[in-house]
Amino acid sequence: MNPDLYLSYPSAFMIGLLGSTHCLGMCGGISASLSMALPVGRGFRFRQTMMLLAFNTGRIGSYCLIAALVAVASTSAANQWQEAGLVLRTLAGALLIFMGLSMGQWWQGIRHVERLGAPIWAKLSPLTRRLLPVNHGGQAVLLGALWGWLPCGLIYSTLGWAALQPTVGSAALTMLFFGLGTLPSMLATGYAAGWVRGLQGNQMFRKVTGGLLILFGLWTLPFTGLGGH
């Protein structure tokens, strides 16, 4: 494992920021519904903000937990197999390229990767329905924590990167920065769903962000030399 990978924190944030429109179709609806369920009146904007922040705190917390579990498994694999880091880096780069191709609407092969998490989600999704409607922040945090396990190619792509980190803590931090990158879009969905949907449907925006994700993927691959490794 390379200590220089600590530099990937800002990159993880950028991946979350650029790719978050991909996740809006899955997470954006529930985020918007939290706002619509609140009674309109005095203090509505404050309650809306607190509810959205609570939901996203739970969601990002799950990302960090998943990253820690993946890091434990990857560390164990690295201890037993010398080339594990090379394989993980190749996988992480390939997934980012697949995600970029999906964002740019050039190829949707990432959907096959997303299906890998379907068995876990099938067990967790019934629990989310028990938390609806959300009446307080505690419920929103729990709902977000469950929603963080929703199968998503963008999350899987970044998890591959997190698995390369030298410690479990740095893997969790990678996903924390990724989650913070997704936060503006998720909050905007709650506040201005129509504007976000328009951005999501903008072909030029999707192609530009898709191209940038592909560059991140190429930078990650061990045999391109773009990342200095």
Image (spheres, rainbow, N blue to C red):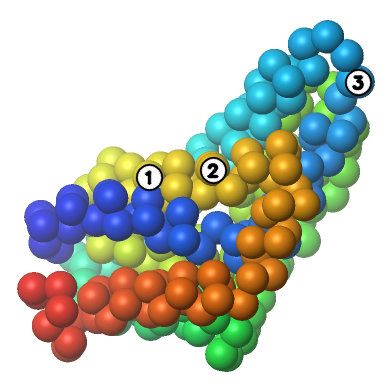
Residue under circle 2?
184
Camera-side mark, 1 or 3: 3
Could you say which is closer to the camera, residue 24 or residue 202?
Answer: 202
Mark 2 residue element: helix
Task: Tell me, yes or no, if residue 69 can be seen here.
Answer: no
Could you say which is closer to the camera, residue 208 or residue 144?
Answer: 208
Q: Residue at x 72, y 30 (%)?
A: 140
Cα–Cα span, label 2 and label 1? 12 Å
Residue under circle 3?
39
Could you say which is closer to the camera, residue 99 or residue 117?
Answer: 99
Looking at the image, how many numbered discs can be counted on the residues? Answer: 3
Q: Residue at x 52, y 49 (%)?
A: 182
Q: Quadrant of residue 128?
A: top right
Cα–Cα span, label 1 and label 3? 32 Å
Three-letter code for the amino acid on which mark 1 is drawn? Phe
Question: Residue 179, image x and y in percent?
Answer: 47, 46
Q: Earlier in the sequence, mark 2 or mark 3?
A: 3
Side (left or right) of 15 relative to 51:
left
